[in-house]
Structures are given as C-alpha cells and as structure tokens.
Image: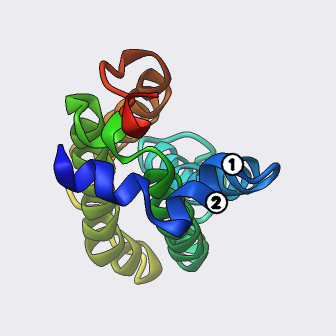
C-alpha cells in the first residue's frame, strides 16, 4: 500500500485527479483508442466467421495499422488514468482479467493475420482453425470490454490517502 500511496502523491497523479479536464481528456482518448483496437479486432473476427462474406477477406488487413494506433492511444491514456487512481485499479482482479482478455484477443488476431490473410490473398481456402481463432478472439474482445466497464463498479479500494 505504501507504493500505491506514493504514486498517488506524484505530481502526475495529483494533476490527473484535480485538473478540471485531465481525467476526462484521458478518458476520451482511452475510449477512442479502445474503439480502434477492439473495433478492428471485432470486424476482422466477424469477417472470418462469415459476416459480410462479399468483402474480400485480405482487405481487412488494412485494419491492423489502425489497431496499432488504437493500442498506443489506449496504453498511453490508460497509464495516465492508472496514475490518477492506482489503488482503485491495481487492487482489483478484474483489472488483470481485462488485460489478459485484451492481450489474448490481440494475439489471436495476430495469428489470424499470419495465417488467414495470406491464404485469402493467394486465393487459397481459409485454414480450418480460422473460425476457432476468430470465435475465440471475438469472445475475448467482448470480455475485455465488459471487464473494463465493470471496473467502474467493482473497486474495493480507492486510497487517495484515505480521503
């Protein structure tokens, strides 16, 4: 707890909590970053599962750079949000579950990009395991978002020097 209390006393943490706009600007950038990251991942997963089958599968590879931009935005803004209330997040197991779901989903999309997009571009059939990868990815994206929303309601510790 001493480390969390120390983080809360840093100038960055105080700024995030007490500035009129800082927390909300970070929250907006976090939401936009997550939209690019998760939205791209969901779109790719749904396409592999057969939604919008008229769209060429390999064209969905264009989402990957935007997902990277989204991940960068979400990580940077997320660290700022974390600095504001470190005990609230770091003492909540749902915070760890959110990270696990999002990282696993991103790894599955990376696997899809390595296996499925080249096969589709070459006109070959989609690999057999592609639907399982996509279904797993879709499930993990949705679980990660759900965990993120649950963080608002499940914290048991706020700290901020025990108010």
- Dot 1 and dot 2 residues touching (CB under 8 Å): yes
User: Could you tell me which residue is drawn at 51 percent across and 74 percent down?
Assistant: 72
Where residue 158 appears, x then y in whole percent?
A: 39, 29
In this view, 131 is above or below 30: above
The residue at which mark 1 appears reads as: 18
The disc at residue 80 is none
- Looking at the image, how many numbered discs can be counted on the residues? 2
Mark 2 lies on a secondary structure that is helix
Residue 121 visible somewhere in the drawing: yes
In this view, 108 is above or below 136: below
Where residue 97 appears, x then y in whole percent?
A: 23, 37
Residue 144 visible somewhere in the drawing: no
User: Could you tell me which residue is drawn at 63 percent across and 45 percent down?
Assistant: 52
The residue at which mark 2 appears reads as: 15
- Which one is nearer the viewer's eye here, 136 or 56? 136
- Which one is nearer the viewer's eye here, 38 or 87? 87
User: Could you tell me which residue is drawn at 28 percent across and 77 percent down?
Assistant: 114
In this view, 159 is above or below 156: below
Q: Residues within 10 Å of mark 1 (few under 14, many from 20)?
A: few
Q: Residues within 10 Å of mark 2 (few under 14, many from 20)?
A: some
Where residue 51 appears, x then y in whole percent?
A: 56, 40
Mark 1 lies on a secondary structure that is helix
Q: CA distance from mark 1 to mark 2?
A: 5 Å
- Which one is nearer the viewer's eye here, 128 or 142? 142
In the figure, is residue 127 to the left or right of 64?
left
In the figure, is residue 21 to the left or right of 32?
right
In the figure, is residue 155 to the left or right of 71?
left
Where residue 94 appears, x then y in whole percent?
A: 27, 30
């Amino acid at each position: 707890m001493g480390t969390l209390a120390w983080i809360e006393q840093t100038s960055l943490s105080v700024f995030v909590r007490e500035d009129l706009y800082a927390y909300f600007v970070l929250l907006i950038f976090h939401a936009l970053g997550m939209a690019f990251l998760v939205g791209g991942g969901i779109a790719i997963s749904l396409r592999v599962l057969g939604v919008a089958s008229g769209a060429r599968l390999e064209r969905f590879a264009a989402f990957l750079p935007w997902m990277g931009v989204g991940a960068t935005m979400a990580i940077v803004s997320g660290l700022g949000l974390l600095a504001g209330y470190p005990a609230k997040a770091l003492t909540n197991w749902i915070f760890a579950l959110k990270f696990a779901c999002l990282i696993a989903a991103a790894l599955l999309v990376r696997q899809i990009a390595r296996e499925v997009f080249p096969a589709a571009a070459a006109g070959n059939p989609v690999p057999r395991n592609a639907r399982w990868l996509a279904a797993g990815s879709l499930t993990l994206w949705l679980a990660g978002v759900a965990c993120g929303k649950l963080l608002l309601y499940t914290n048991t510790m706020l700290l901020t020097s025990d108010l």
